[in-house]
Amino acid sequence: MLAITAAAVLFTTTAACSSDDSSSGGESSAALPSDAFPGTAATGAPVRIGLINNEGGQAISQPENREAAEAATKYANENLGGIASRPIELVTCKNAEEPTSARNCANQMVEQKVAAVVVTSTGLGSILAPIITGAGIPYVTALGGSQQEITSDNSFVWTAGSNTSQAMATFAKQQGWKTAVAYSIDSPAATGSLTRMGGPAFRAAGLDFSLITIPFGTPDATPQVSAGLDKKPDVVLVYGESTVCTSVLKALNTLGSTATAISPQTCAAPEVVSAVGKAGVDGMKIFSSADTVSDNPESVLFRAVMNKYAADTPTSGFAVVGYQGVLGLVRATAGLTGEVTPQTVGNAIRSAKDVVLPAGDGITFTCNGQAVPGLKSLCGNQMIVLTMKDGNLADPTKVSVLAK
């Protein structure tokens, strides 16, 4: 589901249920907590919050992210008192994931004088973040792939940001693996992140690491996959949009690879599972910032909110990033009273501690610049690892992105 220009976000991916259709195939039916919908409605003049979604472009279009953000907004307005007891009004811009569109969306947020901007997922944070934060407006996202998003003042990334590869390296070390091969979509954002962060992290964890690139849209990656398997890897990393995921996973199965496959969320998308087959993805480890399939109350709440406010939106894939972005902002500003301005919103976020990450399996975030050394915009340092079983994600566990 994630495409070329959002490739940086492949390293900050989110989890969701993957099934052969848009339903919640592997999801639990756990009971919803009685206080999940308290009915505390927001009143008064609305608070204008920007929403930038990757939508309408030729390479990527994820309206489900926006729909999930809208669902979280309705939930917050009807049940959580919005922000500072006032209803949230989303000012939405659809970013086609190309530079001109991204720049126009960022400038629109500044012109509209929004109190904060929620970005769902993007590979163009290097364009968006400087314009928005430069205007003194908080830039908030559940994900963050660019250097500007994860190191800028007034940028807040609820999760471990572009550290998926570090979490993978920690996990690989825990498993005792010695050799890793990464098959990555050939885009600067993806390969750059793996070169800067992934490779060094795996080598520091004691693994031999190799990177092999796959052009976007490659229908058959057998030659590239075969070259990587010559290194006899214990683990293979698969990074790409659904076409690359499908071609790499099919080739791994055709060539009889026994290496464990690990990936961000995109390779668990329903279209990938359908194309590769349930057996072809069985046992694959998916690294994510969200759990939408378990009995955890946060996971149950996500499904309930989506069912109530966006029943036709698939909860698979990346929809949860919109939900996490908006509801994370509402929770991080829960202590805000009085005037709502970019400055007061930013101050509220910085002072909030141990905020529960929506759909985060109990993970919390604190935006004091200390979650991950050197990356001051990151507010969390844990990720979730799920296992593909019968075509669905299951068994969430947590792993740190910090080397141990």
Image (cartoon, grey):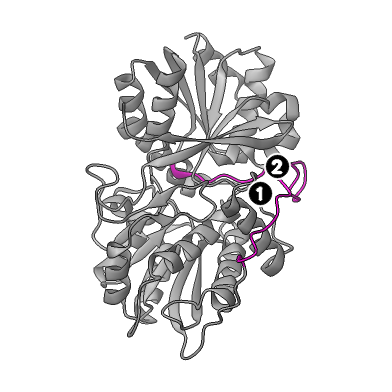
| Category of crowding for the residue at label 1, using alpha-carbon neighbours closer than 10 angstroms: few (below 14), some (14–19), many (at least 20) | many
Under mark 2, the amino acid is Pro
Q: Which residue is pictured at 36% across the width and 77% down the height?
A: 115
On whether residue 24 falls in the magenta region, the answer is yes
**Observer able to see residue 58:** no
Relative side of 75 to 351, left or right: right
**Distance from the alpha carbon under mark 1 to that under mark 2:** 7 Å
* Residue range of the region highlighted in magenta in the rendering: 11-36
Residue that label 2 marks: 270
Residue situated in front as seen by the camera: 393 or 210 = 393
Q: Which residue is pictured at 71% across the width and 45% down the height?
A: 27
On whether residue 204 falls in the magenta region, the answer is no
Most prominent secondary structure in the magenta stretch? loop
Q: Are marks 1 and 2 in contact (CB under 8 Å)?
A: yes
Q: Residue furthest front?
A: 34
Number of numbered tags placed on the structure image: 2
